[in-house]
Image (cartoon, rainbow, N blue to C red):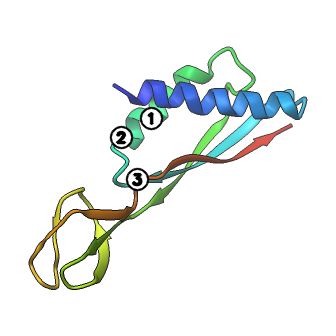
Amino acid sequence: MHEMSIAVNIVKIALEAADKEKAKKINSIEIDLGKLAGVAEEALLFCYDSTCKNTIAEGSVLKINSIPGQAFCEACNYQFEADQPYMICPQCGEQVWLINGGKELKVKSVNVD
């Protein structure tokens, strides 16, 4: 379950940001998570709660902004929303290999007191 290592890194980034601000509490962490990033949201949330225990992030909320996948068909120059990494172009029927959105995984903001 790679979601645990992802949760650990998210909390680490937030703790470093909180330390720079001399914060006593992390209230929430907001992330952008692409639909094609290969991360199960429910597993990430579970791991996040476990990772926050006994830190200033305990009790905080992980806010997930879900970013849709985007694919581009080079055969017909059609851009469309993708829900898996390998798609057939809905316009021309060609195999699409160029995914140009939806793989994001980044900490967007950390709310602290």
| Nearest to viewer (mark 2 / mark 3) | 3
Residue matched to label 3: 103
Q: Position of residue 17 (x, y in %)?
A: 77, 34
At x 48%, y 35%, the residue is 45
Residue type beneath disc 2: Ala
Tag on residue 44? 1
Circle 2 residues within 10 Å: few <14, some 14–19, many ≥20: few
Decide: marks 2, 1 in contact (CB < 8 A)? yes
Relative depth, front residue between 14 and 70:
70
Query: Taking 20 as reference, is 88 left or right?
Result: left
At x 24%, y 77%, the residue is 74
Quadrant position of residue 44? top left
Residue type beneath disc 3: Lys
| Placement of 74 over or under 12, stated as above or below | below
| Nearest to viewer (mark 3 / mark 1) | 3
Residue type beneath disc 1: Leu
Q: Position of residue 6 (x, y in %)?
A: 48, 31
Q: Earlier in the sequence, mark 3 or mark 1?
A: 1
Quadrant position of residue 113? top right
**What separation in Å lies between label 2 and label 1 (alpha carbons)?**
6 Å
Residue, far top:
54
Q: Position of residue 16 (x, y in %)?
A: 75, 28
At x 41%, y 42%, the residue is 41
**What separation in Å lies between label 3 and label 1 (alpha carbons)?**
15 Å
Q: Secondary structure at mark 2?
A: loop
**What separation in Å lies between label 2 and label 3 (alpha carbons)?**
13 Å
Q: Earlier in the sequence, mark 2 or mark 3?
A: 2
At x 18%, y 80%, the residue is 75
Tag on residue 40? 2
Circle 3 residues within 10 Å: few <14, some 14–19, many ≥20: many
Relative depth, front residue between 62 and 94:
94
Q: Position of residue 8 (x, y in %)?
A: 55, 24
